[in-house]
Every structure is written in structure tokens, then in C-alpha cells.
Amino acid sequence: MYALMTTFCPLQAALHKMWTRQLYRKVLHCHLTRSTQPHRHVSRWVKLSAVRAASTTHSTGVLASLQVTQGDHVHIRDVGHVEQVLGNIAAGGREKLQVISDFDHTLSRSTHNGVRLPMTHDLVKDSRFISELNQKKTSEIWRYYYPREVSTTLPLHEKIPLMVEFWNKIHNIFLASDLSRQAVRAIVRENDTRLRDACDTFMSVLHKNDVPLLVFSAGLGDVIHEMFEKHGLTFPNCHVVSNFMTFDDAGKVVGFSDPLIHICNKNRSVLPDDTYFLKEKERTNVILLGDSLNDLQMADGVPQMDQILTIGYLNRHLERLQDFTEAFDIVLVQDETMDVANAILEKIVGSDG
Ligand SMILES: [Mg+2]
């Protein structure tokens, strides 16, 4: 993809920037229309130097007391806004808080020792349960669709049907393979799966404080559950919305849950109903974590949202820093830990939390 971007003509580059702005404004619009209090309005295109100038080094409030937010890899476009939101969320305490997070490369690690780690679909497609021929087919499918998935130049109306095709083709190969409940478990157990460092602390603190965690993923929910179980992080306050396999009586995979969740529709449209968010309607303060601009849609279903603090993990494609800094309140560049989220959480629930 990067190689493609470097060959852009000026017109393509202009279209690319225009599309990115459109996506961001669409996401921001969702925030504005779902919130009872207006979210900050960002309409100007800030230069990276300006972004850096507005870093946490100028903070004298809550952020200044969080040592982990002082690093060079932490980018905050509007320190004042983050100070205000964080202060309001902290004042609301654990009772008003809910957390919404992406899974792949957000709760899970993106890399380890410089090597990119697999996402939930990768674990299955590259497993011993998929034949050599089918692995070859999935590789071809991936080669065609993945650049389109991460493309910031492809218009949404063209991208969405492609993403549906992408996941359906992969899922059909899974269905044609010898996959079962036991196989999924074996795949997770046999692989060196890794959650982001201190993710166990993050999830344990949320559990201990009865703060609901919604994991919203376009990956595979069965793999996510297995990973949480493998890492001893199965908690009742954690609810996973994702693509789940359906099994027959013998445990063989025979289908996938409907609707299909892909990178472009991770929002209220794929929730079965409003039950989850209505149950948590008193929790009007949200911390949202993601590693894609599309993840910002995950909180669309929250009724009467008061405050939202968004944390974006920029794992790679560092040329997107400006896009990320415009879209997320706090951007963490190549940070494979949950240290910042944990420090923020401690501010809200207290150090004894
Ligand atoms: Mg992700």
C-alpha cells in the first residue's frame, strides 16, 4: 500500500486527503449527533508541527500528573480538551464509566520483537486445520482485498461491498475446511498469542470495579473468547460483539453469525438490539480504544453520552499520524502496552482500584 501511495500523482494525493477528511468528518458527525453535549468540533487541518506543539508537555493539569502521557510517542492535539474530558470522567467515577474497545491490535499486541503478530482471522487461516490449497486461496484473497481494506482513497460506497465479499470468501473457506470448536481452541492454545502488555491489569481493574467492557471486533469472536480464556481474563463484565461461528451437534463449524461485521460497519447497525447500551444507559462516560479510524464508530449506540475519551493506537503506517491525531483524543505511536489506559483508569477508579 505504501508503495502505491508513493506513486500518487498530485490529483490522487488530493483525492486521498479529501477522502480521509470526509471519513473523519463522518465519524465526528456521529459523535456530535449521538452526544447530549457537543463534542469538540475540529474542522481545520492542523500541521504536524502544530500537533506536536500542542503536546502534553504544556499540560499543567490532570495529564501532567500522569507520567506515562509525557513520552514522545504520545500525541494529543488538544490538551485542554483532554484535560477537561478526563477531569469530568474522573469526577463521574466508576459508576458513570463504560469502556468500548476494538480487539485486534488494540487489546492484542500488534508486534513482538519486531515481528507483526496475527489477528484473529490470521490465526485460523494460517492454521494446520486449513489445507495447503485453501491456504493458497486465502493468501490470494488477502492479497487482493487487504490493500483495499486499509486504503484511505477508496470511497466508502465502493469499499463496503468489497469488505463483505472479503469476509464472506474467507468464511466460506473456513466452512469448507475441517474446523470445529475443538480446532479453534487448539489453534489459540498452539499459537504464541499475545495481548498488549498490562492488558491483564486493564481488564482486571475494570472487572474489580464493575465497569463494563464492550469488545467490538470485526475479527472472530470465538478466537477472542479463547484468547481471553487462555490468558485467564474471562470476566462477566466483558461482552464481545464480533463474528461468531455456529456449530452443529458434533461441534463442526457450519456457519457464521448474522450480520457480518467488517471494518466499515462496527457501529450500532450490527448490534442485535439496543439491550446492551440501554442496560448501561446510566454510564454516560465512555473510554474508547481502537487502532483504526473506523473504530471511532463503536460508541454510536451509547444513549445520552456525556463524555467520551478516545485513545488510538497507531501501530504502523506512521504517515497517518496526522489523520489519527485529528480523530482520536490521545494517539499512542507504536506503544505495545496498556500503560496510558491503565494510568487514566487509575485516575478514575482510584489507586486502590
Ligand atoms: Mg484493530
Image (spheres, rainbow, N blue to C red):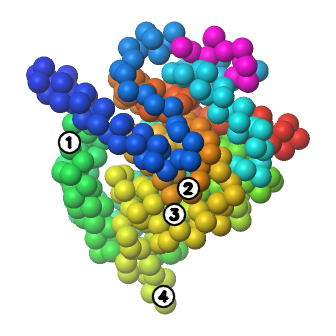
Q: Quadrant of residue 76?
A: top right
* Residue 249 spot, x, y in % from top left: 49, 90
- Which residue carries the number 3 mark? 241
Q: Badge 3, how many Cα within 10 Å: few under 14, some, many 20+?
A: some
N-term-proximal mark, 4 vs 1? 1
- Which residue carries the number 2 mark? 302
Magenta range: 54-64
Give the distance between the C-alpha atoms of the residues marked 4 and 1, in whole angstroms. 42 Å
Q: Quadrant of residue 175?
A: bottom left
Residue occupying the point 37% across, 78% down: 255
Residue 63: say if magenta. yes
* Residue 220 spot, x, y in % from top left: 45, 62
**Total tally of numbered discs in the picture:** 4
- Which residue carries the number 1 mark? 154
Give the distance between the C-alpha atoms of the residues marked 1 and 3, in whole angstroms. 26 Å
**Label at residue 250:** 4
Give the distance between the C-alpha atoms of the residues marked 4 and 2, in whole angstroms. 38 Å
